[in-house]
Image: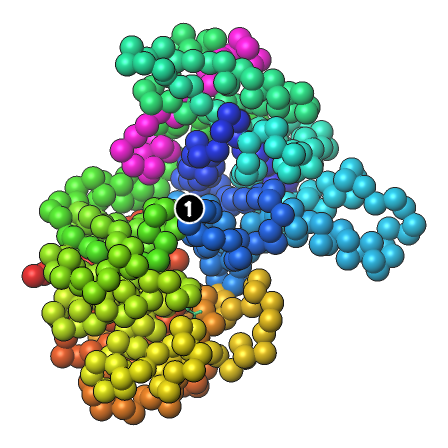
Amino acid sequence: MQTKFIFVTGGVMSGLGKGVVTSSIAKLLQLSNQKVSCVKIDPYLNYDAGTMNPIAHGEVFVTNDGGECDMDIGNYERFLNQNLTKNHNITTAQIYSTVIEAERRGEYLGACVQIIPHVTDEIKRRIRKIAEDEKLDVLVVECGGTVGDIESLPFLEALRQMRLEDGQHNVLFVHVTLAPSLDVVGEQKTKPTQHSVQELRRIGIQPDLIAVRCSTPLLESTKKKISMFTNVTTKDVFSCHDVKSIFMVPQILYDQGIVETIFTKFGKIGLVNTSTNWDMWNSIIKSFENAKGDVKIAMVGKYVTLADSYVSVNHALKHAGAKIGKAVSIDWIDSENINGNTEQLAKFDGILVPGGFGNRGAEGIIATANFAREKNIPYLGICFGFQLAAVAFGRHVCDLKDANSTELDANTANPVVDLLPEQKTISNMGGSLRLGAHEIIIKSNTLAHRTYNSDKVMRRHRHRYEINTKYLDVFEKNGMVFSAESDNSKRMEMLEIPSHRFYFGVQFHPEFNSRPGFPEESFEAFIKAASSA
Ligand code: GLN
């Protein structure tokens, strides 16, 4: 069976929503009973997203197999409700490392190693391997960056070669561009699209479909003009106008006939009736539209200046709200601005502290965790928010005045949070944290057990520090229960305070498992607690 490939490129500028177009096309094919998956190519030179600043680049998304990936992988997982592995995020550094290692082993037999064919071959090999290993009907590959960037050239060249090798019935190119309107009258400008398609054709790629971002639906006359200048028929120019939620994008593309177009171009015979798939998808979208009220959540974290740095947490809160019919509003508060003024948090229905690294703003988080405990406000602490909730409890309840994490004070007399033993000798920053899905054992008769309704759960991790088990006794004596653990009780995975309305911390990252229609359990329990004043 030959897998069909759809390659999505981007023109004009970044941030047009190429990832949403990619996910939406994949979703539509999945709804049409195709076995699909997505790949993200990131042409930058980092090996993976693990060492990148979330404020500049957005969240680092962790896969089950411990990949530290671009946040688009999270979008694909949420749209498709499907787990992906780390090989679905390809970067320049991964390609070059493989080629250089092969060269050092002498595998090129004295040949001069070049971008074409050695680098392009490695790119094609990786893409084809995913298609084969997963026996896919269709693989949708998004090439990051904008056409014309130096970094993306070898990737576009490899994709061009694949079209030549596999034939036009097996490979389609979708180009995402922008049609800006400069005034309220709103003439839709086509020049940026014309130029970016010219650039794409200059490097040998003629797009089959064009998806045009615009604020209002693309006019027929604009489609015609784009068609004329880009050599793409009018019906293959698709309007991607602004909609209330990204989950509505599949429908607007469907309404313009994109599924039929793709099936026809691929020479697939006949679309099957997939109304049950659509009913399920539509009922999920409806649950978001019907969510009412306003559950006010304060998200107190370190990287709040860019909404994308906690994108999975934001989504998970909304998934949880929609499931129980509640709309959730999120206020992002920089933990550095807490400055002892925790009273600003009193007006919220729930407080969430997400993951983070390093000293800046950490005292604000400790004060926040303490405030939520004292005021009986539902609290969900994730990773850093779990560790610092333990620090706050150590200081304010267990009377360990200088309790701290050794991440924040290496010489503290009471290291209630300390380095994992295997982390003590590590010097490399990249890929060296405790990563990926690990099994967690949950104690019965706890909030954790009621929340997960199970003795065991697999969740994804990304941390270097953990609860110091020497302090377990004193914590438990004072009313904090560690309700889940892993690795034969070596590591603590969840904490709770039974006397509190809802005080819950998790060492792992529940947000990466949350999907529209299927919120992760801890988020659902948190939003339930927050909405029942
Ligand atoms: N900085 C903490 C650690 O390394 C928490 C990490 C996180 O929140 N992802 O363990």
Q: Is residue 391 magenta?
A: no
In the image shown, does 499 or 237 lie closer to the viewer?
499
Q: Is residue 249 magenta?
A: yes
Residue 464 in the image: above or below residue 204: below
Residue 441 x, y percent position in the rendering: 37, 79
**Residue drawn at the location 44% of the way across and 34% of the way down:** 15
Q: Is mark 1 within 8 Å of ligand 1?
A: no
Give residue 146's quadrant in the image. top right
Dot 1 corresponds to which residue? 75
Mark 1, Cα crowd under 10 Å, few <14 / some 14-19 / many 20+, is many
Q: Quadrant of ligand 1?
A: bottom left
Residue 66 x, y percent position in the rendering: 52, 63
Give residue 374's quadrant in the image. bottom left
Screen quadrant of the N terminus: top right
Residue stretch in magenta: 226-251
**Residue drawn at the location 34% of the way across and 37% of the way down:** 246
- What kind of residue is marked 1? Asn
244 lies left or right of 204:
left
Screen quadrant of the C terminus: bottom left
Residue 237 x, y percent position in the rendering: 47, 18
In the image shown, does 210 or 382 lie closer to the viewer?
382
321 lies left or right of 26:
left
Residue 427 visible at all: yes
413 lies left or right of 125:
left
519 lies left or right of 163:
left
